[in-house]
Amino acid sequence: MIRKAFKKKSSQKSKIDTFLEKYHLPKGYLSVNRRMITRGVLIGLFWGFIPMPMQMLAVMATTPFIRFNVPIAISMVWLSNPVTMPPMYYMEYLTGNFILGREGISNIELTLDWFTSHMGDIFVPLYVGTAFYSIVISTLIYFVLNWLWIKSVKSEKHQREKERRERRKKEN
């Protein structure tokens, strides 16, 4: 299903293809197949979980080392936006405290002064939790998407074979 939706849109030569040819960019950055899409999700989520500025530039800096669908990766980075960042980073902080076996800070105030004075208490648990989500959870999501894609393709193939058998029965 997913594959068919992408194939319909990518079958025409468009302005994007012309742009890629003009600047000699690899077409792999926009490829729509299982490997490129799932890698894009992996890279995007990896950088999206990390509390840092300019996550989209980090995605772009990854392109020479790993081939993936860049628009998908950039859209995955957008999952961490000003609305989702506070709960995401708080969850990472709590997870880091759990992994480190710490209690954590209970009386949190949402002021710049409070964060400045408690940065030492927050920094280590936050980045331990960040490492967990960036590495473990994004990798888990990668494997789940890969499995779902393969399952979807096999299901489509099975459905086509079933329809062919039914047509043959009607013809005979």
Image (tube, helix red, strand yellow):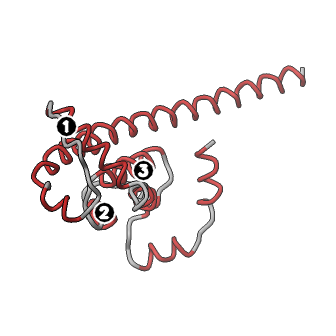
Classify residue 136 by image quadrant.
top left
Query: Looking at numbered disc 3 in the image, what kind of residue is underneath it?
Result: Met
Classify residue 132 by image quadrant.
top left
- Judged from the image, the secondary structure of the residue bearing numbered disc 2 is helix
Residue under numbered circle 2: 55
Instruction: Name the one closer to the observer, 94 or 51.
Output: 94
On screen, residue 113 above or below 142: below
Q: Is residue 96 left or right of residue 47?
A: left
Disc 3 versus disc 1: distance between alpha carbons? Answer: 35 Å
Q: Is residue 61 left or right of residue 7?
A: left
Residue under numbered circle 3: 36
Q: Earlier in the sequence, mark 3 or mark 1?
A: 3
Disc 2 versus disc 3: distance between alpha carbons? Answer: 19 Å
Closer to viewer: mark 1 or mark 2: 1
Q: How far across and down, in percent of the image, does residue 41 sit? A: 41, 49
- Bin the neighbour count of mark 1 within 10 Å (Cα to Cα): few under 14, some 14-19, many 20 and up: many
Residue under numbered circle 1: 97
Q: How far across and down, in percent of the image, does residue 79 sit? A: 43, 55
On screen, residue 122 above or below 102: below
Taking the spot 54% from the left edge, 30% from the top edge, the residue there is 151
Classify residue 133 by image quadrant.
top left
- Judged from the image, the secondary structure of the residue bearing numbered disc 1 is helix
Instruction: Name the one closer to the observer, 41 or 1.
Output: 41
Taking the spot 32% from the left edge, 42% from the top edge, the residue there is 91
Q: How far across and down, in percent of the image, does residue 146 sit? A: 44, 37
Query: Looking at numbered disc 2 in the image, what kind of residue is underneath it?
Result: Gln
Q: Earlier in the sequence, mark 1 or mark 2?
A: 2
Label disc, if present, on residue 65 of the rendered structure: none
- Judged from the image, the secondary structure of the residue bearing numbered disc 3 is helix
